[in-house]
Amino acid sequence: MRPEEFLRLLRQGPFVPFRLYLSTGMTFEVRHPEFAALERTTVWLSLPAVLRPRAIAEREVVVSLLHIVWIEFLEPAHPSEAGTNHG
């Protein structure tokens, strides 16, 4: 994936959460644009704690843009879930 394409996903308004599918078989969800920091060849993803959904990032991973195989758009958060962060 080219960085310009990924940046378009982050900047679209309103933002639509999405799941990244990697060539390794791993998946990562981007629920908010602030949880992804784009660089020229990689994207840093902040992953919230699973057991503490309102917590700030528990860990970060770096994904090569070359390994993003496809993207699945997810349902936008319902107003009652707007304050929760799922990664």
Image (cartoon, rainbow, N blue to C red):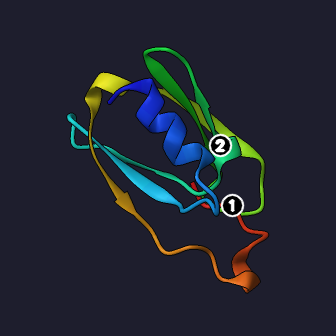
Vertical side of 63 occupied by 80: above or below? below
Per the image, the residue denoted by label 1 is 85
Residue at x 20% of width, y 35% of height: 23
Give percent across and percent down for residue 33: 64, 47
Q: Is residue 6 left or right of residue 26?
A: right
Disc 2 residue type?
Phe
Disc 1 residue type?
Asn
**Residue 63 visible in this rendered orientation of the protein:** no
Vertical side of 11 occupied by 68: above or below? above
Quadrant containing the N terminus is top left
Nearer the observer, 56 or 39: 39
Vertical side of 1 occupied by 30: above or below? below
Residue at x 40% of width, y 54% of height: 19
Q: Quadrant of residue 82?
A: bottom right
Q: Which SS class for mark 2?
A: helix
Q: Is residue 3 left or right of residue 52?
A: left
Q: Which labelled disc corresponds to residue 35? A: 2
Give percent across and percent down for residue 32: 65, 53
Separation of residues labelled 1 and 2 (CA atoms): 9 Å
**Residue 86 visible in this rendered orientation of the protein:** yes
Which tag, 1 or 2, sits closer to the chain's start? 2
Q: How many marks?
A: 2
Give percent across and percent down for residue 34: 70, 43
Q: Which SS class for mark 1?
A: loop
Instruction: Check whether the beta carbons of the residues at disc 1 and disc 2 lie within 8 A of each other.
Output: yes
Residue at x 61% of width, y 59% of height: 15
Viewer-nearest of discs 1 and 2 = 2
